[in-house]
Amino acid sequence: HLICHSLNDGLSALCTKRISSSPKERERPFKFSLIGILMKLVFSSIRIIRPDCCATYTSLTNVLFFSFCSLFSLSVFLSLIPSVFLCLCFSPSQENNVDAIHPGYGFLSERADFAQACVDAGVRFIGPSPEVVCKMGDKVEARALAIKAGVPVVPGTDAPISSLQEAQEFAKTYGFPIIFKAAYGGGGRGMRVVRDYEELEENYQRAYSEALAAFGNGALFVEKFIEKPRHIEVQILGDKYGNVIHLYERDCSIQRRHQKVVEIAPAAQLDLHLRDRLTSDSVNLAKQVGYENAGTVEFLVDKHGKHYFIEVNSRLQVEHTVTEEITDVDLVHAQLRVCEGRSLPELGLEQDKIQINGCAIQCRVTTEDPSRGFQPDTGRIEVFRSGEGMGIRLDSASAFQGAIISPHYDSLLVKVIASGKDLPTAATKMHRALTEFRVRGVKTNIPFLQNVLSNSQFLYATVDTQFIDENQELFNLKPTQNRAQKLLHYLGHTMVNGPMTPIPVKAKSSPVDPVVPSVSLGEPPMGFREVLLREGPEGFARAIRQHQGLLLMDTTFRDAHQSLLATRVRTHDLKKIAPFVSHNFNNLFSLENWGGATFDVALRFLWECPWKRLQELRALIPNVPFQMLLRGANAVGYTNYPDNAVFKFCEVAKENGMDIFRVFDSLNYIPNMLLGMEAAGAAGGVVEAAISYTGDVSDPMRQKYSLEYYLKLANELVKAGTHILAIKDMAGLLKPKASRLLIGALRDHFPDVPIHVHTHDTAGAGVAAMLACAQAGADIVDVAVDSMAGMTSQPSMGAIVACTRGTKLDTGVSLDRVFDYSEYWEVARGLYAPFDCTATMKSGNADVYENEIPGGQYTNLHFQAHSMGLGNKFKEVKKAYAEANKLLGDLIKVTPSSKIVGDLAQFMVQNSLSRAEVEERADELSFPLSVVEFLQGHIGIPHGGFPEPFRSKVLKALPRIEGRPGASLPPMDFEALESDLRMAHGNEITPEDVMSAAMYPKVFQEFKEFTSNFGPVDCLNTRLFLDGPKIAEEFQVELERGKTLHIKALALGDLNKSGQREVFFELNGQLRSVLVKDTAAMKEMHFHPKALKDVWGQVGAPMPGKVVEVKVKPGQKVEKGQPLCVLSAMKMETVVNSPISGIISKVHVNADSSLEGDDLILEITE
């Protein structure tokens, strides 16, 4: 297809032939015309010169197309004009008998030397004469002509200034503010406003540099800057016979960086007398210089209605479209016919016939990011769909799928023009059209434009050039979701590089999806949650205690898959089975589905929002209480938090559907537990205080954790107001005898308090132990569905249900429904084969009674041992764990204390250290940080105190924490945190997001970055999530109800020079492709380093572009805010300032370096 850019947008040219001609001898009709313009003008010119080609452009013959951007950079090209251009253009022009050249909107259209070169070569220049271009292109001479014609002007220099000193003298005479303007070009380049003396030198240098780069001449002149004017321009048209008319005005006041964003014709609420003065002055000035062809006279209008001449643009303007729409005059047609020799009256263009009809608005859709100061964005357009409809006109530039947006040319994608009977009508049409646009791969200003179109001042009042600066609400941008394209990026990345979540073992997901058992229609039957909602936590606890039979808590939705599948089960698979659970297990005490490790893993490895999981499951299971694991003062984290953070977390969790808070502390440290209990109670939740179990109360030789110890703890917790008392046996150490002793004693001491028991089945005695607990008086025991039970998980639900059937402990659960439930999870478990503990561990082991490793940790240690090639030494690892536990004083081992023991055990194995050697050399060994912090008191005080002299030898002079670790922490400022998150991630931040960031700041940041790149991956099925699709595979993805994507993976491209592969898809019947970096291949390729956001002192490029100037060098001291370097992109120069004070340690760029976004510029150290 034909794509012809203006010389500032690609320096391209197109040559085409005209069939018909005028018979008049004084006219010289075109046979061939060379067109160096935007694609819209190319097509407009072709339609006029060759009308038989209007229907289809592929029928063109004698077409000559060549691009100068591939031969020269813009700066080099401009320095060679006109000689090289003539060599490149006129040689083929003469060979093909070209009669005329249309210069388009580009910078060459205002080059008098180029216009003269055309004349000298016998080729007509479609525009004013070279003499007029020279006069009007020189702003100083144009200003003098305006004064001569009696047109008011702004105070300014009479000639271009040649030094900073001249600018300083002007400022002293007229005062600030002043404005620098490029003497030989426009478009906002080389234009800088200066408001005080301190800004003068820097802005002079930037304006000069921009003008030089854009126009080949850095000459500037200075004017007094008029505050808050309207920018009104008048379209004029003249012929060879002295006829000049105007086509009324355009309002171009909506600008940023002196570049027009939205243009309106006619100007809204413009005084008729002022309109007459503007148009009259424009025509008089044009007649005085003998103006021929199209042009624009530009004015500023101050708040008193006084107008000042700015300049004449001796070319067709980008915004000429709105004039065409309201006057029904084809300006390109008129340009060509006037150049052929036609008079305006012959073309039917007489002043009394030019009428205003309605209103038109033009929006320039650009690849700029308004949220970052309209910084240009670059890259590949992956998706392009335009808006259409009645009253909408599109003038396209480089907008098509697959187009590469370069930092070296104009950012304009497409001009959208809307017409209507008045401004509000046109604005409504424009807003609708912009809403229909879909541009993916690069950022655009469309959300900003939509805000402008909705602004009441824009619609019903007048705007000035400060409109954008004074309406900051315009930058409250509604982010585009772009979900489909982001998902394609994720799938493509997985196809090229494999799973994006860490995989413990090399195993593929099962290709078979689980079948959900049938679910009856209608609402699910009532469950215990109705009791809780009706009677509150106290009434709920009474109902549980009075219930006849054994109650079950199902851990399948959390602890079971944490123990067996590394906590990797996704919301996608939980949601599918949730309605079945709601309808068939309504008599469960609760469903454990949240908190603990699931919160961390959901964000870190599954890229899901844990709050969204809670919300969606609550909607699907409204009748069964939910239970979560709360780590006391540690909430759902692994560290201490301010007290208000724990309270706030429980409050938000309760609001999102959580019912029961199982509160525990890894050391059974009462102060930590009491804080968690108070927080859960204050939120209105059911408080279930859980005592972590270790040791063996049935063994008289093990008295550190005796029966009396547990009874004393329980007494304190009941006094503190717990609604339910729980025993948390994380390692599965409860034997039937110990179960009867412990639970029997608790029931005797606390006859009215419900008792709940949790265990793991690592040794294989879990069912027996839970039955013993039930017989001794426990009200609730924990189970997992059969296919997710056993080994390091909980005892089998089916076994407990079957063993109690027909007894006083009958659970009331249907065994047939358990079988159906188990069948679903048996197949679903196959989807998680890469995480299944059975890949390395084939059974449980009764040696857990010796090493006391908690269930989930037992699985993880087994994985780690095999991944490190120590699978045959796992026995030694377990032995070391037991020894490490003794070194630390025989701890209760639950997260995080279990991790501390595990870290010390691994340290001992890796360094081949025995317990005796560690004790002997404790003052010289470098222990894991978790061990050191434990001994300092970071997680609390263990029962019996810290081990001495081991603690003193390890800590030496390190500080120790006395009392509850979090008690001394200052309150968390949630308002400040939310503000920071909104600054970083936009205004879509929720209270739940704030809590996620409070618990896991870095993990939440990484989660947001992931979702901004790859979208809502939780809507993918698990096999696609882990392995990606196979080539030619077709599948559907439901984004939300009523929005389903139909996707087919088509092909995987070859590696390109940038280390990328193009991955092709068919999305809803349309071809889509994404470029994916091949991480394996890129390790062997050299690329400019990126600035790491989490590394202090690394300064990255804020946008793609070229380095114009480096202002610092290694070893130099810099202050915060000091300029470091200057970047240029799309003719805009940006100063990169130092974010901190320090010393430049290394500079990674030099002048002329081409950078991508976030490329490392330099490094700063203190």
Image (cartoon, helix red, strand yellow):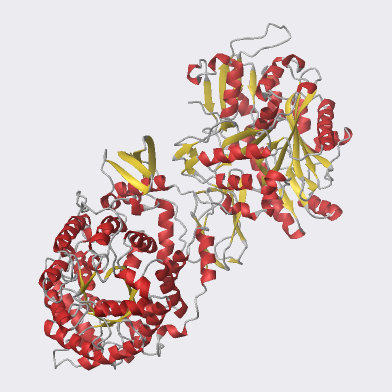
Please say if 349 is above or below 11. above
Q: Nearer the viewer, residue 472 or 343?
A: 472
How many discs appear? 0
Along the line of sight, which residue is nearer the eye, 422 or 623? Answer: 623
Residue drawn at x 44%, y 77% is: 647
Q: Is residue 549 above or below residue 283?
A: below
Q: In the rendering, at what x and y percent does residue 466 appear?
A: 71, 50
Residue 1083 at least partly seen: no
Foreground residue among 686 and 47: 686
Q: With respect to residue 491, does 852 lie above or below?
A: below
Q: Is residue 951 above or below residue 561?
A: below
Q: Residue at x 18, y 87 (%)?
A: 744
Can residue 781 be seen? yes
Would you say 691 lies left or right of 673 here? left
Please state if 377 lies on the left or on the right of 452 as rendered: left
Provide residue 201's location: percent of width, then percent of height.
72, 55
Viewer-nearest residue: 841 or 567: 567
Residue at x 81%, y 50% (from the top left corner): 166
The x and y percentages for residue 1117 are: 59, 67
Question: As drawn, is 193 to the left or to the right of 546?
Answer: right
Quadrant assignment, res 900: bottom left
Measured as percent of width and height from the top left, residue 316 is found at: 68, 29
